[in-house]
Image: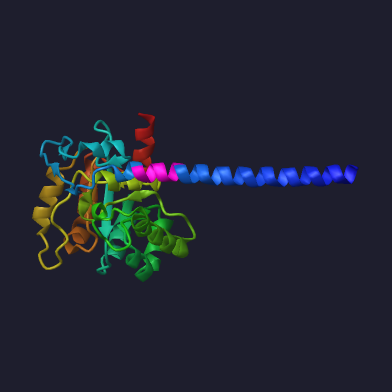
């Protein structure tokens, strides 16, 4: 009798377990479907990031027609009342200059963030290891550098992130920081929401200048005038490490910022302070 009761109890427990698994799976799929439907309802209109530059030491105003960016863990500037700068480099390829940039940053004990594509990681593992070891953030800039606004399928969108994450972990053994720089500054409301769903913050900028053409490099004087006149508290500064000019003036620029009372910090500090506020 006891054996019969045990078998009955076992069978009932088994079916209850199966039922719970099925219900839980269906609930997860329903929620996932609802999330995808909600994301699909968001606008896919493509915008190109811009800001209105100022020369008075104050923060510039961001893009007006896409002010929804603020809802999706997106940042272009830090606190307006704190002399902190966030120096970032968008690295699509190596031009033989990054080692010098890292040497200069080390000299000044300054931290930066390098937004890299997958091929950069695979082609320059030693540089990636050095960046991470010296306290810089190596961040996601996508696998193939597309306009993320034009990728409306979530799985394809996600693959632009995960392959870069994998490449970084293969090289460093660590998880990639969850900061994303949209290639070319192109975005949509849907792409920002997708990025947020993947656990990332979207990082735009409040300073940039035309520095990326190897055969049309700005003069030292022009570059320094642009940088100095438009420096402001909380600036997220976008430079390109392939720039010969940037590489050669970086020591002077960092010295200038130090004399002005600025400190360079990582995006971890930006996000932490924003959460507090």
Foreground residue among 144 and 235: 144
- Image quadrant holding the N terminus, namely top right
Number of marks drawn: 0
Q: Is residue 146 above or below residue 270?
A: below
- Image quadrant holding the C terminus, namely top left
Q: Please indicate, yes or no, whether residue 265 appears anywhere in the rendered image.
A: no
Q: Is residue 85 above or below residue 184?
A: above
Please name the residue shown 35% across and 44% down the image: 37
* Quarter of the image where one finds residue 13: top right
Foreground residue among 158 and 206: 158
Q: Is residue 96 above or below residue 34?
A: below
**Farthest residue in the top direction?**
277
**Farthest residue in the right direction?**
1
- The segment highlighted magenta reads 31-37
Please name the residue shown 73% across and 43% down the image: 12
- The answer to whether 81 appears left or right of 225 in the picture is right
Q: Is residue 87 magenta?
A: no
Q: Position of residue 53 (x, y in %)?
A: 12, 42
- The answer to whether 220 appears left or right of 42 in the picture is left
Please name the residue shown 41% across and 45% down the image: 33
Q: How is the image coloured?
A: rainbow
SS assignment for the magenta stretch, majority: helix
Q: Position of residue 100 (x, y in %)?
A: 28, 63
Q: Position of residue 203 (x, y in %)?
A: 29, 46
Q: Please indicate, yes or no, whether residue 164 appears anywhere in the rendered image.
A: yes
Q: Position of residue 229 (x, y in %)?
A: 12, 43
């Amino acid at each position: 009798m006891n054996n019969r009761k045990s078998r009955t109890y076992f069978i009932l427990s088994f079916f209850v377990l199966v039922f719970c698994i099925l219900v839980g799976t269906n609930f997860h799929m329903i929620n996932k479907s609802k999330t995808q439907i909600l994301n699909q309802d968001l606008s896919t209109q493509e915008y190109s990031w811009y800001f209105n530059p100022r020369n008075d030491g104050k923060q510039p105003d961001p893009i007006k027609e896409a002010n929804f960016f603020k809802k999706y863990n997106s940042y272009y500037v830090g606190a307006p009342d704190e002399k902190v700068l966030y120096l970032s480099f968008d690295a699509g390829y190596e031009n033989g200059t990054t080692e010098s940039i890292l040497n200069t940053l080390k000299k000044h004990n300054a931290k930066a963030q390098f937004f890299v594509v997958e091929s950069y990681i695979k082609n320059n593992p030693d540089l990636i290891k050095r960046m991470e070891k010296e306290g810089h953030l190596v961040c996601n800039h996508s696998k193939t550098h597309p306009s993320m606004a034009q990728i409306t399928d979530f799985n394809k969108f996600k693959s632009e992130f995960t392959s870069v994450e994998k490449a970084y972990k293969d090289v460093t053994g660590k998880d990639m920081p969850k900061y994303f720089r949209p290639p070319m500054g192109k975005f949509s409301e849907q792409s920002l929401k997708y990025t947020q769903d993947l656990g990332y913050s979207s990082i735009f900028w409040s300073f940039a200048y035309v520095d990326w053409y190897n055969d049309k490099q700005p003069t030292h004087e022009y570059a320094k005038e642009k940088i100095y006149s438009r420096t402001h508290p909380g600036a997220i500064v976008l430079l390109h490490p392939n720039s010969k000019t940037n590489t050669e003036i970086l020591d002077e620029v960092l010295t200038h910022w130090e004399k002005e009372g600025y400190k360079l910090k990582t995006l971890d500090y930006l996000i932490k302070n924003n959460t507090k506020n």
